[in-house]
Image (cartoon, grey):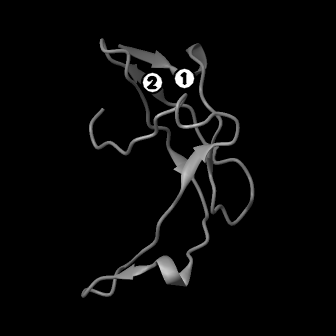
Amino acid sequence: MRLGAEEIWIPDIFLYNNAMAKELQCWNSNVVVRSTGEVIWVPPCHLTSYCNATETIESESGIISCMQRFGSWTYDTEMINLEPTEQV
C-alpha cells in the first residue's frame, strides 16, 4: 500500500556527520507499507556531510567512499530499525 508521508508518523532521522548541523532537507514522497508491517520511506533529500580521512576507502578506479551515519536523535535502535534497501 502506498500512502502520502503526511498520513503517517515519520521519525526524526538525521545525518550524524552532517556538515551543516541541520536536519536533512527532504521533500515529500510516498511511503510504502507492506503486509508484514514493514514501512519503507525513500524521500528525495539533499545533504552535505563531512568525510573523515581515516574512514575513507579509495578504490582502484580512484573513487573515494565515505561512511554516512544516519539515525534518530530521540529514538534508540530498539524503536527504529534503519536498514538500507534497494527495493521499494
The answer to whether marks 1 and 2 mark residues whose Cβ atoms lie closer than 8 Å is yes
- Image coordinates of residue 68 in percent, x first then y, are 51, 61
- Image coordinates of residue 71 in percent, x first then y, are 58, 45
Please name the residue shown 53% across and 37% down the image. Answer: 77
Among the 4 quarters of the image, the one containing residue 31: top left
Secondary structure beneath label 2: strand
Residue 15 image label: none
Three-letter code, disc 2? Val
Q: Earlier in the sequence, mark 1 or mark 2?
A: 1
Among the 4 quarters of the image, the one containing residue 36: top left
Position of the C terminus, as image quadrant, is: top left
- Image coordinates of residue 59 in percent, x first then y, are 29, 83
Please name the residue shown 68% across and 66% down the image. Answer: 19
Please name the residue shown 37% across and 15% down the image. Answer: 37
Position of the N terminus, as image quadrant, is: top left
Three-letter code, disc 1? Ala
Please name the residue shown 34% across and 81% down the image. Answer: 63
> Badge 2, how many Cα within 10 Å: few under 14, some, many 20+?
many
Report the side of 67 relative to 74 (left or right).
Answer: left
Residue position for label 1:
5
